[in-house]
Image: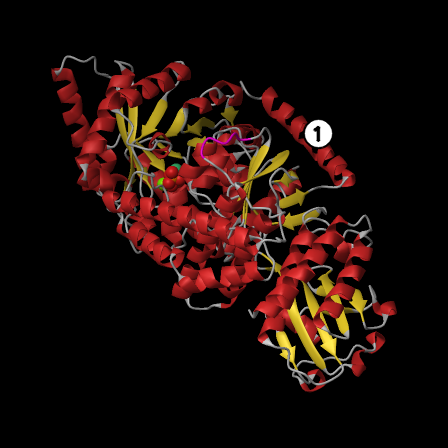
């Protein structure tokens, strides 16, 4: 930027800052700003259009156009040149506006007098909040410096809006992060909660917008940049030592970017025009994000994503804001994130009151953890990370998939009503807690619970579960920064049994891989990890960890009965080999003089359709089978459990799946091999009823589901339910759900 232009821009920004300090209301501030910009840039018109809602812009202040049009003139995003700026997040510089494609004449504004037009987006972090326009009567081309200067003003405007400098009448004037907002998404875990937002990746609020001394700002920027480079270098050498090639590649790309002259010179130019170092970084970041949304090439998008991440690090250094390891999780925290893996979620601990994700999926292990913790989790809540600020009050309605951000008092009252209804339902379940899950025709169903942490165990008595049907041992591995020690695991397994107070606990050996990747594992570069080297495949190929875990289980049991099962068995020999390994380890332990259990049951999880067709000898050898419905369903339908788009297409009550379950139950029955269902669907009353009607007699589910499922089963006659399912199967409908739900309604 030329020196004269830079001085001029700095002077204008200084005056803008003064308007921030004015006592006047939001409208007065905007009026003052348009006047200042028009005078400073020598234009006859300066107007500010702000976004009213997702689709509309509203003229909120003008110098030069008819004042009566303020708050009257509105246009849709994409409509006219102003709408085009908002839609594309790009400046429009038109010497002859009426002749420019997309021009639309707004009669009430009196803009027919003006020939030339320059509009720039008012955007913050890739979100367009409005459009800033200057116009002139004569036909003129606005210079690059002028475009730049207007962009800088727009940047400051965006921040002022964010800080609530323009609040006044109407939606368009409100600060985006102060108004109540309702968002919707999918339900990964039901429940209601009230709390405050905790951003997994907190936004940085830049409140220091304009600086008088560009040299001092450049020094701050250079210092932060040096720190950033050192930080990336350190990470890179640590990663190279750890030999995680992919991560090293990413960090090398970071290193190049952190040393990029182009980036640095753009930042310095913004500082020259009067921005603080942090706002200069944010300006670049905003532009990067806007580009990110438009670039179709995935490689380039990744690189822009890296640049975005790097900008975040730089902003954290310049402002001292952001999350650090060891930060305290506030009371009532509802975690808000783009997405989250199970290990990261576990780090927050059970204190969370809910989880809201912009992406995510019902079948993910993060969802399973939320389910185990009985906290509501919503997924696919678009733009939540942009809308929410740390500590914003939030209500999560995990029944309808609604998030109320910064709720109004009326919304809070309605929500409280729902909570009361919920606690009434809980009372109903506590009445039947000690009663058996026996259907009207006298069939007894065993109800067990799923667990994965020691803290889950008290739910055994509060839910009335008859044991732990699935103890997911991998959570202990995911929570740590290194492989847990054998003694440590033995102690935990022993404590789990102590806390179960004689009720059976089925320990599933390590099911790692797929989306369950511990921080200390080198992530495998597999085309499809869910069908990759995971669970028992990994355990059998690398036996060290598996042997260690089996020893820990034997030692933890200390002579008490031991039930273990192996995950993801796809064929007989995998089960036989794993079982042989267990007995070899047991023999070794006995030889060492340890007390070993004598009452031992070794089972398998049926999670791939292939196992249902295994040789008879498998069913004879296996002490019990547990259907891992989450995995089984994804392989049965060839629909990734983590891919919401395909997962939802296939109903669990689809006749094909139910018939398959019926066949598995019959095959197990033939060999007297007990079979249970421990996937998430067991915890849904209608699904559980259908599985029972298909012949299953044992379920394992999250503790909170035991009440509702038991309540349903106790009201039903399985013969009747089977008749309804059979009739429905004959009808040619793909799912029996419609017929079954109609029948259930007719009975209630
Ligand atoms: C399953 O697949 O149903 C199961 C219980 O295992 P996980 O969800 O841990 O893969
Ligand atoms: Mg599984």
Q: Quadrant of the C terminus?
A: top right
Task: Say few, some or many: other residues with alpha carbon within 10 Å of mark 1 (under 14 / 14 to 19 / 20 or more).
Answer: few
- Residue 649, given in percent of the width and then of the height, sits at 49, 56
404 up-or-down from 451: above or below: below
The residue at which mark 1 appears reads as: 420
531 up-or-down from 604: above or below: below
**Dominant secondary structure (helix, strand or loop) of the stretch shown in magenta:** loop
User: Ligand 1, what quadrant?
Assistant: top left
Q: SS class of the residue under badge 1?
A: helix
Seen at 71% across and 41% down, the residue is 407
Q: Which quarter of the figure has residue 413?
A: top right
410 up-or-down from 634: above or below: above
- Magenta stretch bounds: 325-329
Residue 299 in sight here: yes
Q: Is residue 645 magenta?
A: no
Q: Is residue 326 magenta?
A: yes
Q: Is residue 280 left or right of residue 416?
A: left
- Residue 307, given in percent of the width and then of the height, sits at 44, 57
Q: How many marks?
A: 1
Residue 659 in sight here: no
- Residue 238, given in percent of the width and then of the height, sits at 28, 43
Q: Is residue 196 left or right of residue 37?
A: left
């Amino acid at each position: 930027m030329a020196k004269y232009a830079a001085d001029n821009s700095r002077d204008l920004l200084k005056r803008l800052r003064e308007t921030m300090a004015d006592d006047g209301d939001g409208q007065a501030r905007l009026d003052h700003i348009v006047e200042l910009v028009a005078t400073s840039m020598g234009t006859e018109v300066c107007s500010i259009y702000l976004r009213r809602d997702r689709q509309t812009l509203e003229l909120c202040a003008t110098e030069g156009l008819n004042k009566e049009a303020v708050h009257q003139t509105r246009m849709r995003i994409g409509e006219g040149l102003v709408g085009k700026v908002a839609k594309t997040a790009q400046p429009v510089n038109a010497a002859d506006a009426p002749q420019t494609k997309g021009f639309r004449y707004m009669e009430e504004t009196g803009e027919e007098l003006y020939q030339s037009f320059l509009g720039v987006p008012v955007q913050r972090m890739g979100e367009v909040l409005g459009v800033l326009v200057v116009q002139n009567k004569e036909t003129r081309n606005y210079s690059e410096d002028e475009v730049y200067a207007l962009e800088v003003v727009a940047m400051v405007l965006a921040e002022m809006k964010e800080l609530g400098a323009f609040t006044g009448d109407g939606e368009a004037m409100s600060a985006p992060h102060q108004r109540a907002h309702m968002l919707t998404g999918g339900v990964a875990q039901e429940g209601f909660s009230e709390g405050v937002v905790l951003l997994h990746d907190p936004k940085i609020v830049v409140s220091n917008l304009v600086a008088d001394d560009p040299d001092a700002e450049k020094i701050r920027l250079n210092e932060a940049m040096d720190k950033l480079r050192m930080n990336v270098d350190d990470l890179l050498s640590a990663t190279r030592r750890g030999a995680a090639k992919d991560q090293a590649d990413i960090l090398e790309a970071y290193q190049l970017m952190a040393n990029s002259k182009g980036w640095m010179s753009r930042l310095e130019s913004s500082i020259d025009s009067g921005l603080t170092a942090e706002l200069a970084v944010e300006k670049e970041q905003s532009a990067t994000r806007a580009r990110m949304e438009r670039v179709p090439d995935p490689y380039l998008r990744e690189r822009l994503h890296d640049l975005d991440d790097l900008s975040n690090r730089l902003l954290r250094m310049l402002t001292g804001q952001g999350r650090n390891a060891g930060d305290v999780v506030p009371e009532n925290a509802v975690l808000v994130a783009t997405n989250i893996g199970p290990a990261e979620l576990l780090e927050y601990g059970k204190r969370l009151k809910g989880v809201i994700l912009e992406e995510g999926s019902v079948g993910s292990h993060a969802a399973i953890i939320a389910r185990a913790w009985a906290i509501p989790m919503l997924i696919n809540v678009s733009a939540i990370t942009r809308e929410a600020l740390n500590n914003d009050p939030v209500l999560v309605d995990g029944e309808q998939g609604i998030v109320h951000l910064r709720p109004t008092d009326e919304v809070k009252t309605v929500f409280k009503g729902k909570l009361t209804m919920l606690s009434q339902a809980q009372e109903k379940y506590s009445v039947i807690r000690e009663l058996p899950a026996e259907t009207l025709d006298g069939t007894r169903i065993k109800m067990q619970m799923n667990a994965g942490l020691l803290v889950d165990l008290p739910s055994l008595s509060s839910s009335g579960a008859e044991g732990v049907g699935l103890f997911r041992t991998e959570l202990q591995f995911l929570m740590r920064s290194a492989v847990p020690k054998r003694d440590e695991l033995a102690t935990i397994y022993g404590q789990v049994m102590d806390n179960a107070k004689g009720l059976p606990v089925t320990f599933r050996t390590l099911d790692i891989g797929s989306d369950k990747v511990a921080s200390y594992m080198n992530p495998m570069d597999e085309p499809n990890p869910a069908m990759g080297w995971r669970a028992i495949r990994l355990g059998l190929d690398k036996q060290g960890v598996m042997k260690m875990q089996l020893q820990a289980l034997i030692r933890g049991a200390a002579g008490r009965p031991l039930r273990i099962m192996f995950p993801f068995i796809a064929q007989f020999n995998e089960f036989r080999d794993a079982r042989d390994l267990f007995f070899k380890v047991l023999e070794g332990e006995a030889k060492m003089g340890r007390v070993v259990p004598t009452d031992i049951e070794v089972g398998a999880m049926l999670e791939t359709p292939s196992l249902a067709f295994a040789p008879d000898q498998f069913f004879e050898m296996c002490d019990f089978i547990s259907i891992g419905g989450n995995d089984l369903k994804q392989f049965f339908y060839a629909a990734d459990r983590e891919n919401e788009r395909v997962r939802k297409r296939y109903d669990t009550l689809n006749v094909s799946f139910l018939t398959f379950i019926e066949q598995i139950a019959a095959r197990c029955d033939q060999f007297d091999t007990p079979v249970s269902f421990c996937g998430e669907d067991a915890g849904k009353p209608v699904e559980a009823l259908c599985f029972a009607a298909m012949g299953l007699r044992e379920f394992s589910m999250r503790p909170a589901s035991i009440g509702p499922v038991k309540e349903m089963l106790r009201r039903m006659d399985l013969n009747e339910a089977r008749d309804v399912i059979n009739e429905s199967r004959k009808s040619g409908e793909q799912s029996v759900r419609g017929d079954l739900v109609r029948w259930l309604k007719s009975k209630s």
